[in-house]
């Protein structure tokens, strides 16, 4: 079975200049966990996933606090304190950033005529849920784990 037989054709894409806020709304509205990021010519530049957005939010940050030593000690000590921020505030801080700043750039992809087995190998080895599908240098779709499973069920005898 070939990738083009099971992939989602004409999948939505994002531009590197789109804002993270707009991208997050599109992901949520479509009920997908990620989208390919392409340039104006349709060439693959990366993938933006929900994980990329959550990672960029940095709801935790570290702060150094100086500990005042007792009089018998001659050094000054520091301790790291992990502080948490509200997620909505953290998202507000990254909402206007460009998708290109947050996306994953080292992206696995498959050619439209590759086998489903090759797509499965890439998904497992790279630990990804979806792969952009490329034909002649342009993104033409996406293949997900669900697409592959649905393709298997369609091909099974009843």
Image: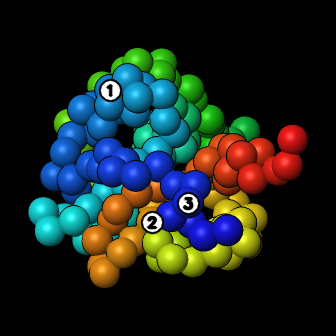
Please say which color scheme the image uses: rainbow
Choose top left, top right, bottom left or bottom right for residue 6. bottom right
Residue 102 visible somewhere in the drawing:
no
Q: Residue at x 48, y 28 (%)?
A: 31
In front: 112, or 13?
112
Q: CA distance from mark 1 to mark 2?
A: 23 Å
Check disc 1 and report the residue beneath it. 25
| Quadrant where the N terminus is found in the figure | bottom right
- Place of residue 42 in the rendered image (x, y in percent of width and height, measured from the top left): 22, 65
Check disc 3 and report the residue beneath it. 5
In this figure, what is the number of numbered marks? Answer: 3
The disc at residue 143 is none
Q: From what the image shows, is residue 27 above or below residue 147?
A: above
The answer to which of marks 1 and 3 sits earlier in the sequence is 3
**Outermost residue, right direction?**
158
> Quick one: SS at disc 3?
helix
**Outermost residue, left direction?**
40
Check disc 2 and report the residue beneath it. 133
- Place of residue 24 in the rendered image (x, y in percent of width and height, measured from the top left): 36, 32
Q: CA distance from mark 1 to mark 3?
A: 29 Å
Quick check: marks 1 and 2 in contact, CB under 8 Å?
no
Crowdedness near tag 1: few (<14), some (14–19) or many (≥20) residues, C-alpha within 10 Å = few
The answer to which of marks 2 and 3 sits earlier in the sequence is 3
> Quick one: SS at disc 1?
helix
Crowdedness near tag 3: few (<14), some (14–19) or many (≥20) residues, C-alpha within 10 Å = some
Q: CA distance from mark 2 to mark 3?
A: 12 Å
| Quadrant where the C terminus is found in the figure | top right
The answer to which of marks 1 and 2 sits earlier in the sequence is 1
Q: Residue at x 71, y 66 (%)?
A: 120
Q: Residue at x 46, y 72 (%)?
A: 112
Q: Residue at x 41, y 29 (%)?
A: 30
């Amino acid at each position: 079975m070939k990738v083009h037989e099971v992939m989602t054709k004409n999948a939505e894409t994002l531009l590197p200049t789109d804002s993270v806020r707009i991208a997050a709304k599109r992901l949520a509205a479509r009920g997908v966990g990620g989208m390919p990021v392409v340039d104006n010519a349709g060439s693959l530049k990366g993938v933006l996933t929900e994980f990329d957005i959550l990672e960029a939010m940095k709801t935790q940050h570290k702060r150094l606090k100086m500990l005042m030593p007792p009089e018998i000690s001659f050094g000054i000590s520091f301790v790291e304190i992990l502080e948490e921020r509200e997620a909505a505030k953290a998202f507000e801080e990254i909402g206007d950033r460009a998708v290109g700043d947050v996306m994953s750039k080292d992206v696995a992809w498959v050619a439209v005529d590759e086998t489903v087995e090759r797509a499965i190998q890439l998904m497992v080895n790279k630990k990804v849920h979806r792969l952009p599908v490329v034909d002649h240098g342009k993104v033409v779709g996406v293949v997900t784990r669900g697409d592959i499973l649905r393709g298997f069920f369609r091909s099974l005898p009843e």
